[in-house]
Amino acid sequence: MSMDVTFLGTGAAYPSPTRGASAVVLRCEGECWLFDCGEGTQTQLMKSQLKAGRITKIFITHLHGDHFFGLPGLLCTISLQSGSAVTRQPIEIYGPVGLRDFIWRTMELSHTELVFPYVVHELVPTIDQCPTEELKEFPHVDEADNSPKEGQGRTILLDSEENSYHLVDDEQFVVKAFRLFHRIPSFGFSVVEKKRPGKLNAQKLKDLGVPPGPAYGKLKNGISVVLENGVTISPQDVLKKPIIGRKICILGDCSGVVGDGGVKLCFDADLLIHEATLDDSQMDKAKEHGHSTPQMAARFAKRCCAKRLVLTHFSQRYKPIALAREGETDGTAELKKQAESVLGLQEVTLAEDFMVIGIPIKK
Ligand SMILES: [Zn+2]
Ligand SMILES: [Zn+2]
């Protein structure tokens, strides 16, 4: 099952011609999950190999404009391009409390009738996810209880034992969220592919005298079979090693994690996507604005034993390396060095718009 990640926007604060506002797509078997949807995400999608109509889930890390101002426009365009009679599962949207009301109001004010259903599931942050002075603007669960006709969606509270939020648990994936510290409450998401049974070992089946047919299907599905000679064959006798699932973690803006949920959920991640808004020489300024530097991101990746770190959400001053004019040093290459100084031999990737990273099946 192929799986890849496409960066549609890698810039902080606002979209520019060289870096779009935050948006990442995780694609698996043709289905697309969008993480953040900054202004201009729909045009970035059109320039990429991806199709907006394939988006089935949207995750918003936090309610700063550069992470979700593209959402109403994108939903309208998907609707326009869908034709009139759409029979599809609702688009599931996950994000902090306040998001449901925002989407509902924009649709109402613009007299927009989307041709497909959607539900907004809201995560309720805790008060320690942002500085105290920002709490006056803290959205309350009660105020968001203004149900749109599209279906309310869930209100998801922190599971304080696990220190995480349970978002998705289907046949293939488990998605959980964890708390981050930022100027306003922000979240990270961990997507874990479930373990799949290994393939049937044809030679062993033959050696044990299992006749081809329904018995194969039963064994593949974990059910023992009894042969005509009375011998019982267990699935573990004939199945190869199970295929371990992949783990992709995407963090929103942050200057750190809150609680141990982040480290637990990102542990051993195959791909960890972390912001690095400013370089290490501006660490104090970055922290003051609730952001990270390459070293801060790398230290988190190290704590989690992440296999690959990708940095994104760069201040617009850091141009993609290929676009830096000759002799001009804007410090972009420095960001990579700073992160790698923490991780030793492990290479760190600086994201650029339209970069695609494949996540191979584990051996
Ligand atoms: Zn941002
Ligand atoms: Zn932010």
Image (cartoon, rainbow, N blue to C red):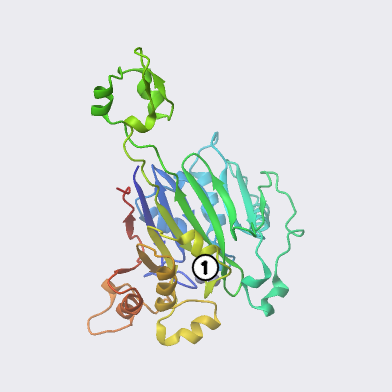
* Dot 1 amino acid type: Asp
Q: Is residue 216 left or right of residue 157?
A: left
The residue at the far front in this view is 230
In this view, the residue in front, 237 or 211, is 237
Residue drawn 50% across the image and 76% down it:
291
Residue drawn 55% across the image and 58% down it:
177
Image spot of residue 43 (x, y percent) = 43, 57
Quadrant of the image for the N terminus?
top left
Is residue 196 among what the camera can see? Answer: yes
Residue drawn 40% across the image and 47% down it:
245
Residue annotated with mark 1 = 66
Image spot of residue 57 (x, y percent) = 52, 48
Is residue 38 among what the camera can see? Answer: no
Q: Is residue 49 left or right of residue 13?
A: left
Query: Is 194 placed above or below 300 here?
Result: above
Picture quarter with ligand 2:
bottom right
Q: Is residue 147 left or right of residue 172?
A: right
Is the residue at mark 1 in contact range of ligand 1, meaning its CB lies under 8 Å from it?
A: yes
> What secondary structure is marked by label 1?
helix
Image spot of residue 84 (x, y percent) = 55, 36
Image spot of residue 48 (x, y percent) = 36, 54
In this view, the residue in front, 126 or 74, is 126
Query: Is 142 placed above or below 301 here?
Result: above
